[in-house]
Image (cartoon, grey):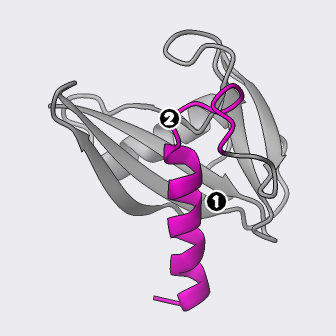
Amino acid sequence: MKKLNIIAVFNKNLDKCLFCIRAKEPYKGLYNFVGGKVEDGESNDDAAYRELFEETGITKNDIELDHFMDLNYFKYDNNLQVYYGILKHDVDLVEEKNKLEWVDLNEQLLNNEKFAGNYNIPHIIRQIKVYLRNGY
C-alpha cells in the first residue's frame, strides 16, 4: 500500500488553516492540505516534516506535528496519513510548486468547486478541532 501524508497547519488562534492550491492533478486548481509521499525506508513522522518543509519552508522549530488519523483507500491501494500542527510563531512561507494561502475556517469548506478531497477537508478539520477543544 502506497503511503501518503497530508498536513493541516493551523495558526496560533486556530481560526486559519494553511492550504496549497494544487498545480497538478489530482485536484488541479483546488485548495488542499500540503503533503506528499512517504519514501521507502522513511518513517511516517520524518516524511511529514520533510514534505511540510519542502512545500512551505516550515521546520520542526516552527511546529510540532501530531499523527491524528489514517484513511485507507483499499481500492486505490493508498494509506493517507493525516497530521496536524499549530504554529508556534509567525513564519515566512516558502512556496515550492503550489501557491500557498491561509484560509479562514469559517469559509465554505464544503464547496467542492474550491476545495479538494470530496468533503474530507471539513471532516478532518472538524475532528481535529473537537479533539483539541476536549483536551484529549
Q: Amino acid at mark 1?
A: Asn
Mark 2 residue element:
loop
Which residue sits at x=69%, y=46%? 109
Mark 1 residue element:
loop
In the visual, does 32 lie left or right of 72? Answer: right
Q: Amino acid at mark 2?
A: Asn
In the visual, does 119 lie left or right of 61? Answer: left
Whether residue 89 is in magenta: the answer is: no
Q: What residue is shown with label 1?
A: 61
Magenta range: 110-136
Task: Residue 99 in the image: state x and y as whole percent.
Answer: 76, 23
Disc 1 crowd, CA 10 A, few/some/many (<14, 14-19, 20+): few
Taking depth in this image into account, of 59 and 4 the one nearest to the observer is: 4
User: Can residue 109 be seen in the rendering of this structure?
Assistant: yes
In the visual, does 84 lie left or right of 42? Answer: right
Front position among marks 2 and 1: 2
Marks 2/1: CA distance?
32 Å
In this picture, is 50 found above or below 30?
Answer: below
Task: Residue 82 in the image: state x and y as whole percent.
Answer: 42, 51
Which residue sits at x=69%, y=38%? 19
Q: If the image is split into quadrants, where does the C terminus sit?
A: bottom left
Task: Residue 38 in the image: state x and y as whole percent.
Answer: 31, 33
Q: What residue is shown with label 2?
A: 118
